[in-house]
Amino acid sequence: PTLTNVSNGSTDGRIFLLIRPQENESGVHRLVALLKSPLFDALRERLGSQGALESYALSVVAVVEGDLRQANFGVSAAVLRQLESVEVIFHCASPSQFSSLEVAVSSNVQGSEELLRVAKRTMSSLSAFVYLSSAYVSPSLSNSPIEERLYPLSFDPYKVIRQCRNPGVLKGKSFRHLQSAYPSNHAIACMLTEHVLVDHKEHIPLAIVRVSLVGPTYRLPFPGWIESPTAVSSLFLNVGQGLVHLLPTDPNSIVDIVPADFAVSQLLCTAAFISTRTHTSVSTYSSIRRPASESRASFHPPPSSTIPLPPTSSLSLSHTPTFTLPKAPPSFSTPSATSPTPVFISHCATSSSHPLRWGYAMQTAVGYWQQHPPKSAISPSSLTLVPSYPYFRREFLFRYQVPTRLYSSLAR
């Protein structure tokens, strides 16, 4: 999020950007490659050249080459001393594409544990620790309002974490009861990370921002920017290309998409909010106080309480990877006894209060593509949303499968 300020040329102070170097590519080279993105076109034009942009960015951004999964990020004591002055942490290092729960937990939970440990030990001036989480950490509440709180679990999250860290003694079916209750392994990892951070934060001013699916920008740095097409963005692109004409979707269902600049704004405003206010009415709940039961992943809402919203609450639109893990520090195997400071949790997603529905979204997309057809489109853009899956299968059969089989038979 702080790189957005760089793109506006309005950064004060120093930004430390933790980047994991890749093979044959240093952290600085990865940052320079990022600066070639259209995201920085306005600032590049203002400064006059790509070289001037790189010089400016490197003057305000200090690249720290490290790995969250290593003790002290794998950096030297001298670098750690530089981090003592950090006032705000944006923890967004949470990859979302995993086919293995073990990999998801080792990447998300382990890195979050070490970041929190370093923050508590060295960052005495820290005023905000903002964790970017998922809006899908409470799946069993999908048919009822989901409050901005940490819901207790009916199972022991630390047992799941320990099992994920010892995959050799497990079979794949060990987590099926858990995975069947969540939309993705990423959501499970975010749920576990939230409970670990809340249980062990101690004096750290922690905030959690739960974001749903992130789509192209609405306004900043310009409308429609996205670094790479996501699953949802790919759907809209395929409709424009004339590749998709039929979807098994209820037109009245809510689209869980928020523009990328909305999500960034909420992260920044959340950091400012908890840095300057005391919000004693926010309640937190320990995940370990309920009887442990791993039969299913269910949630039990606690009694209602008042939760203050930031001034910018209108922004909230209500192959398995394999790698060798570096030597890691000790993990938080159990929750701490107390969490003396409150936690601020906010959602950044569409909601039933101000819904964006699939019917409107796809009608708007088709209208746009009909007025601006892509040169590479294979057919005009059109789309039919079918709320009944059996009816969708029948439509798909007669529209596509029967003609395909007929053409195949004639070709023989």
Image (spheres, rainbow, N blue to C red):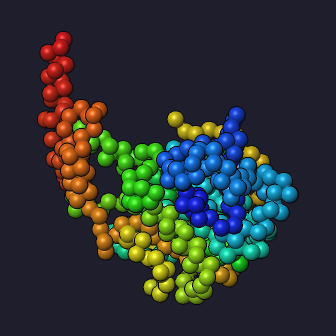
Is residue 127 visible in the rendered image? The answer is yes
Relative horizontal placement of residue 65, taking residue 280 as reference (left or right): right
Residue furthest out toward the top = 412
Report how many numbered discs are placed on residues in the image.
Answer: 0
Relative horizontal placement of residue 225, taking residue 10 as reference (left or right): left
Q: Nearer the viewer, residue 282 or 218?
A: 218
Residue depicted at x 74% and y 75% = 125
Image position of 243 with respect to 311: above or below: above
Counting from the top left corner in percent of width and height, residue 161 is at 63, 57
Counting from the top left corner in percent of width and height, residue 223 is at 38, 55
Q: Quadrant of residue 326?
A: top right
Counting from the top left corner in percent of width and height, residue 261 is at 45, 61
Is residue 294 visible in the rendered image? The answer is no
Q: Nearer the viewer, residue 256 or 360?
A: 360
Residue depicted at x 38% and y 69% = 317
Q: Nearer the viewer, residue 350 or 276?
A: 276
Counting from the top left corner in percent of width and height, residue 71 is at 78, 55
The quarter in which the N terminus is drawn is bottom right
Image position of 409 with respect to 186: above or below: above
Q: Quadrant of residue 257?
A: bottom left
Residue depicted at x 42% and y 45% = 229
The quarter in which the C terminus is drawn is top left
Residue depicted at x 39% and y 47% = 231
Q: Nearer the viewer, residue 79 or 319?
A: 79
